[in-house]
Amino acid sequence: MSDFLSARRTRIAAALQLEDAILLVGAGGPVPLPENSDQQYPFRSHAEYFYLAGAECAGGVVTFDPHEGEGWTSFVPAVTEGERVWEGREQLPGTPLAALEPWVHQRRGRPVVMLGAPRPGGPADDEVTRLVCARLTHARRPKDAHEIALIRRAAAATAPGYAKLRGWLRAGVTERALQIELEVEFARHGATRPGYGTIIGTGPNSAILHFEPSGRAAREGEFVLVDAGAEIDRYMADVTRTYVVGTPSAFQRDLYQVVLAAEERAIARCVPGAEWKQIHLAAAVEMVSGLVDLGVMHGAPETLVEQEAHTLFFPHGLGHMVGLGVRDGSGLQPGRAKDPRPCLRTLRMDLPLAPDYVVTIEPGIYFIPALLNDPARRARYRDAVNWPLVEQHLHLGGVRIEDNVLVTTGAPEVLTRAIPKALD
Ligand code: GLY
Ligand code: MN
Ligand code: MN
């Protein structure tokens, strides 16, 4: 076993505080395509399994018994003849999966914690499992050196994709054509695949937060929002850039500057001990302040944020953790309850930052007809918004800028800094 995996397991074993409980972490199984093709959806082991096993293995289970010296065992299924013939699979090293039930049986009577993908019918103590699951998530938050190296490689494979895409930005290019150029360039630079479904929206589509690229062609003067990242060995970057085709209008430039300034200030706040919720709310106040200056909103920025008026234009959280999955390790600090304020419903984390956390910072301002045409919101925020101006820009789309930031004991490091942030 590699040194990094062995060190990781030792650290995690201590963090989980299992006492008398035994731990089972399942990879999950392949899901067949619904077309009788003898093929499956691309398989990814559950992130908790991958983290502790260090490899993909459909059907695999990693176990830990705190009462035993080494403690960890990796159970792997026997490769079948069909898998050898159709998929060229080889037998993975480990203990045969058939030995798992006897392993569990020998320890009967002890609490069982089951993480990763649930095993059908597998025994689990729900209360203990919830507690240990939260401990594992928390222990996975500081990325180890192996993980940080992979995220750096994913960011390095992402940058040339954005560089290539810039050269393709012109009136008439479709969202789909941009996606193809971007993803091919990721792959040329070592990406295993895109880390998540690439998001590209032109014009009004740039205000749809997770827009799937379509055949729509960009027009002169429109926003183009691109949110995509390369993945290498299960670790990924998560990057957004917004451009304008041709020459931006003064309003587009101003809007972009408001988002960019909020992003850069939020990045600078990513230091150990900083509360994520406060970084989010400070970015909301700064963007509202920008919208007041642009004449889109009226009032005192802090008051408008207290009234949750910012959610009309900034309806999502400032970001999340990223690494082994696009929302890796996000959530609550152990012992905290979810903040009940409606405007924080979409905030993906509530915790203080710590060294080696990798987070995204992704503020955005959007003109989203589904929110801005809602009569209840129009009534509630009648005086907070310049509605005639909003009407003018209702189909303008939106701006989001997203970088990946490594929290250190010194200044935050922007892992995606090689991807230029320029509107045109
Ligand atoms: N790429 C999706 C997100 O930014 O969360
Ligand atoms: Mn993103
Ligand atoms: Mn993101």
Image: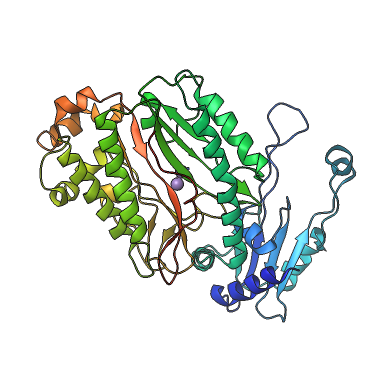
Instruction: Name the residue at 65% across, 40% down.
Output: 187
User: Is the residue 341 above or below the residue 125 in the image?
Assistant: above
The x and y percentages for residue 131 are 49, 67
Snapshot quadrant of residue 181: top right
Q: Is residue 210 above or below residue 70?
A: above
Above or below — where is 66 with respect to 136? below
Q: Along the horizontal axis of the image, is 237 left or right of 349?
A: right
The residue located at (63%, 70%) in the rendering is: 8
The residue depicted at 52 percent of the width and 39 percent of the height is: 162
- Report x, y in % for residue 234: 63, 51
Residue under the image location 62 percent in, 37 percent down? 185
Is residue 250 rendered to the left or right of residue 240? left
Image quadrant containing the C terminus: top left
Number of numbered markers: 0
Counting from the top left corner in percent of width and height, residue 338 is at 34, 57
Q: Nearer the viewer, residue 368 or 423?
A: 423
Question: Which coloring applies here?
Answer: rainbow
Q: Nearer the viewer, residue 362 or 47?
A: 362
Is 173 left or right of 349, judged from the image as shown? Answer: right
Q: Quadrant of the N terminus?
A: bottom right
Can residue 231 be seen in this snapshot? yes
| In the depicted structure, whether residue 259 falls above or below residue 376 | below
